[in-house]
Image (spheres, rainbow, N blue to C red):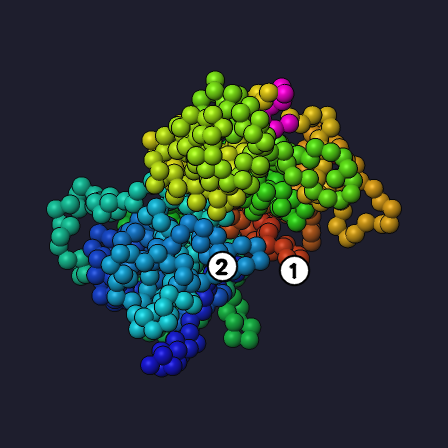
Amino acid sequence: DRRLGRARRRRFCRHCMSNVFKGDLKVTNQSLMGKADVKKLRASLLAEFPSLSKKALDVILGKDELGVHKCSNGTTLYVPGDGPPTLFDDGFGCIFPTLTTLWRLPGMMPELVTHPPVSKFLLPRERSAGADMMLPGVIVPEGGLDDVHIGQKRCIRVEGNAMPIAVGKMIVGAAEIEAGGMKGKGMEVKHVYHDSLWAYSGRKVPNDGFLETEVVASDGLAPSAAEVAAPPAEESDNADEPDDEPPAEADAMSADELMEYCFFAAFKTTCTDAELPLSADRFYSHHMQPARPPGQPPLDAKKSSFKQIGKFLKAQHKAKLIAVREVKNIITLLSVDRHSKEYVEFELRGGAASLSTRTSNSADAGANHVLTGAPAGAWTRDEDVALRTKPPVVSDAWQPNSYTKALFSAVGRDKAGFYTAEEAHAVLEAYVQQRAVAGAGGAAAGGTSRAPAASVPTWLVDAGVPVVEAEGCAAKLSAGGYDSVRAMCAAALSAADLEQLSLTAPHAAAVAAAVADEVRAFLGAAGVPPAEAESAASSLAADGFDSVRAMRAAALQQADLATYRVPAACVDAVAQGLSRPPVASANGGAGGSSVDAAAVPLDELLLESLVKVAGGAKKGTTYPTHLSLDDLQARLIERMSPFHKVVVEGEAPLYKKGALKLIQVQMKRAAGHNKTHIIGLESFLIPPDAVAQALKLRLGCTTAVLKLPGNNVKEHEVLLQGHCVNEVVEHLASVYAIDKKWIVLPKKN
C-alpha cells in the first residue's frame, strides 16, 4: 500500500509545477470570455467551492465582462473589469483563486495552518522561488486534519493571522499521511505572497502581519460575508433571483452588422491615426472587441459571413474606407478615411463617448494632447487618480553578514534581520556589557576571558533576599569561603548548609533555590508561580538566557518576556527586576565591573567580527587589545551589509541591498525622434507597466517597457515617444506622491 501511494504521488507530480509565478510575469494575449464560458465557469466554481454564494461569485467574476489574460509561463489569468486578477489557471487546467480573492473570501477553501517562522521558507527571495509546504511544519488541530486527498486545493495561513499567504494543491492524502506520519512534502505551492502574480495584482497586503521577509500573527480580521459584496440599493430587491440568463436584447444585431458596427466604433472611440499602422489581429482584439455595445453577443468573426478578420478588412479596403497592405499573409491596417460618408454618418450606441468628444473636452480643460489607445471613458490630463496620498519614507538599514552574525547571535538577536544604526549600536553595547574582557593579556594571546560574574549581593537580591540584608548575607557567605557565585554553585549548597552560616530559614531557602536554578528563583522572587516559573525558565534557557545577567544584557522588555511564557500578570514585575541597578559590593564595585567607553577590552569574538579580515593574517600581525566604543560602533556599521528600506502607503516595506537608486528621467534622440526614458521606478514600488499605460492614455504617445540589459538585472525602463519630462514628473507626483528630490532630471544646457 505504501509503494502504491508513492506511485500515485509520482504520477500526480508529473502533472504539477510548483510556484508557477516564481519568474517574471508577462501577459502575451488578452481577450474577453463569452457568456456561455462564464456560465460554465460559474457552475464549476460552485461545484468545487460549495461555500460560495452568488454575491461572492460576483466579486470573483464581476457583473460585467471577464477578461482572459494568457501569460508567457503558460498560465491564464481571469480579470473582472479593471480590477486585479481573481482566478488563475496553472497551465494544467486547474483553476485557483488568487490571494487578493482569498483576502476578501478567506473561508472559500480549506486551509493548512503553520507557524509564523515557517513562512520565511515559503516566501520567494532573490535567489529562491520559495519552498513547498512540508508536513512537519503543519499545525494539526485537536480533531486532526479534515478530509485530505491527493489533488485537493488548499490555502496556507500562519497561526494567529486569518489571511492566507499561499495557495496550492495537496500531493499526499490521508492514507499516505497515516502510513508515513507527518513527514515529507505535503502541498505544492502554486501562488504565494511576494511572487510575480502578487506584484502584478498591485502589491497590496491585507494586514500589518504581512512583513517583507515573513508573515506573523496579526489582529487584522477577515471581512464578513455581508461585507464582501453588498449589492447596490437598486439591485437589492432582485438579489435572490437567478442571474444566469443573459439580458434581454431588444435589437440584437446579426454577426455581420455587429462586425460593421464595431469596425466604425473602434475608429470613433479608441483607434487614432497615431496608432496606425496596426496589425489586423491587434486592431480586432484591442479596438473592435472592446467597442462591442452592451446587450449584444460577443464579437466573433467566425460567425460572420467573412469568417476571418482579414477578409473583412479587405472588404472595407475595396469600399475605400481604409487602406491595408498584405505581406506574407500578414495584413496591416495603414490608414482610415475619416471623411467618408459612412464614417461621418455613423452614430455610437449606449452613450459611448466618441474620440472627437473626448478630445474637445480635453482641450477645454487645458490639455493640448490627443488621446490615443484609450478605451471609452479613459483618463484625460486632469483625471489622474491619486493611488498614494503620502510620500514614500526612505531610511537606511543594515543586515548582519558573515563577519557580524555571531555577534548578534551572542545576544539573542535575529542574525537575518534588518537594523537601524541605533539598534546595531545597542546590540554591540549589550554584548560589551555582557562579555567584556577584563585584561589585555587574554585578547593579545587570542584567548577569550570569561565575562565577570555578578557580585554576590546582586545575585542574592535577584534570588529574593531583601536589599538591606543582602550585604550581611554576602559577608557571612564570604566568611565561610563562598566569596563568589561560582563557588556557591560548585558546592551545591543546600538550605540546611546555608542555615548553619547564620542565614535565616527563608533566606536560606531562597538562596538554595537560586543555586539550583538562578533564573527560576529570580522569577519566583518576582511573584511568578512555581509551575509557570519553571516553564518560563526552561524557555529562556533554550534561547541562551540561563542567567539573570544574560537577561539583563539583552535588555528584555515586557513583550519579549511574554514570548517566553512569563504570565501576563507578572511581566511588569519581572521587567522591573531586570531594570533594577546592581547592588554595590563590599569593596565598592558594581555588580560586575563597568567598562570604560574609551578603552573597551576585546575578546576573540569582537576581534573576529570587527577587527580581523577574512583570509588569514600575515605572520607577525598583531591586534589591538582595547578600542573605544565609538570606534567599535563605526567598525560594526562598516562591517555589516548596507540596505535601504522603502515604506509606501498600503504596501509591505521593501528592503533592498545597497544605496537607493533614484528615478532617472532622461531625454535622448534616436532616428530623428525625441524619446523620454524612465528608469528606477521599481525602487519606489511603482510598476513600470502601469506608468507606461497611464502616460499612453494621458499624453497620446507611443510607449514601451523594456528590460534593462544584464543577466541579473530585473529592473525595466519605460520609453515614451516625444519630449515628456515635465509630464512624467507631474504624473509621478500626483499619482504616486513622488517628490522631485527622488528624481534625477536631465541637466539644462
Across and down, in percent, residue 151 comes to 33, 70
Proximity of marks 1 and 2: CB atoms separated by less than 8 Å: no
State left or right for residue 544 relative to residue 709: left
Pointer 1: what residue? Answer: 711
**Residue 732 rendering spot, x and y as whole percentages:** 53, 38
Residue 218 visible somewhere in the drawing: yes
Q: Of 583 and 33, which appears nearest the observer?
A: 583
Instruction: Say how many tags the image has.
Output: 2
For residue 459, above or below residue 161: above
Quadrant of residue 286 within the rendered picture: bottom left
Which image quarter is the C terminus in? top right
Secondary structure category for the residue under label 2: loop
Residue visible at 49% across and 65% down in the picture: 72
Q: Amino acid at mark 2?
A: Gly
Q: Residue at x 58, y 49 (%)?
A: 718
Can residue 201 be seen from the camera position used here? no
Q: Residue 481: image x %, image y %?
A: 59, 31
Of callouts 1 and 2, which one flags the residue occurring earlier in the amino acid sequence? 2
Query: Residue 70 or 374: which is nearer the viewer?
Result: 70
Q: In this orientation, which residue lies closer to the viewer: 197 or 579?
A: 579
Left/right of residue 73 with respect to residue 729 in the rendered view:
left
Mark 1 or 2, which is nearer the eye? 2
Q: Which residue is mark 2?
A: 130
Q: Give the image quarter of residue 311.
A: bottom left
- Measuring from the top left, give residue 445's x and y in whole percent: 78, 43
Q: Report the span colored magenta.
A: 587-593
> What type is the residue that disc 1 sits on?
Asn
Q: Residue at x 18, y 61 (%)?
A: 245
Q: Residue at x 51, y 51 (%)?
A: 689
Please say if 560 is above or below 307.
Answer: above
Is label 1 in a helix, a strand or a loop? loop
